[in-house]
Amino acid sequence: MVSKKSRSEVRIKKHKRMRNRFSGTAERPRLSVFRSNNHMYAQIIDDTVGNTLVAASTLEKDVKSELKKTNDVEAAAYLGTVIAKKALDKGIKEVVFDRGGFIYQGKIRALAEAAREAGLEF
């Protein structure tokens, strides 16, 4: 009988393959996205040093207070605008988008498009 890998194992393998192709630099850091069943997390990372420059998630009080639910497309779009505003305040305009092995649709797409509309370039 053929055993089937779990979705999380497949996602982690995809993410590792993607990370071989690109990394964040000081001039163009990496916008990394992770979503769990209940929340979403976004970080802007400089991989040359290993520092997180900006971070936002739906767990933060000011973000959570603006949302009805923390795990839907509207929450992802709002998180995209929040991370973009924080990045622009730190002087970061261009990033490399790291979808974390997730498929580019739904929440991941909503976050990316909202970040682009708020001023980030990728």
Image (tube, rainbow, N blue to C red):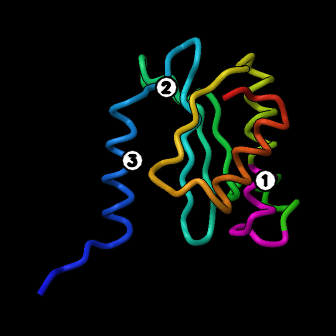
Q: Residues within 10 Å of mark 1 (few under 14, many from 20)?
A: many
Residue 34 point in image, percent of width and height:
54, 53
The residue positioned 72% from the left and 26% from the top of the image is: 121
Q: Amino acid at mark 2?
A: Asn
In the rendered view, would you say 21 is above or below 39?
Answer: above
The CA span between labels 3 and 1 is 22 Å
Q: Which residue is mark 1?
A: 77
Q: Look at the image and say whether residue 74 sits in the magenta stretch.
A: yes
Relative to the observer, which residue lies in front, 116 or 36?
116
Q: Amino acid at mark 3?
A: His
The CA span between labels 2 and 3 is 19 Å
In the rendered view, would you say 58 is above or below 91?
Answer: below
Relative to the observer, which residue lies in front, 41 or 114?
114
Q: Mark 1 or 2 closer to N-term?
A: 2
The residue positioned 26% from the left and 72% from the top of the image is: 5
Image: magenta residue range: 68-79
Q: Is residue 49 left or right of residue 66?
A: left
Q: How many discs appear?
A: 3
Assign a secondary structure to mark 3: helix
Image quadrant assignment for residue 40: bottom right
Relative to the observer, which residue lies in front, 84 or 113?
113
Assign a secondary structure to mark 2: strand
Image quadrant assignment for residue 1: bottom left
The residue positioned 18% from the left and 80% from the top of the image is: 3
Q: Which residue is mark 3?
A: 15
Q: Nearer the viewer, mark 2 or mark 3?
A: 3
Q: Residues within 10 Å of mark 3 (few under 14, many from 20)?
A: some
Q: Look at the image and say whether residue 113 sits in the magenta stretch.
A: no
Residue farthest to the top, as pictured: 27
Q: Which residue is mark 2?
A: 51
Residue 85 point in image, percent of width and height:
81, 33
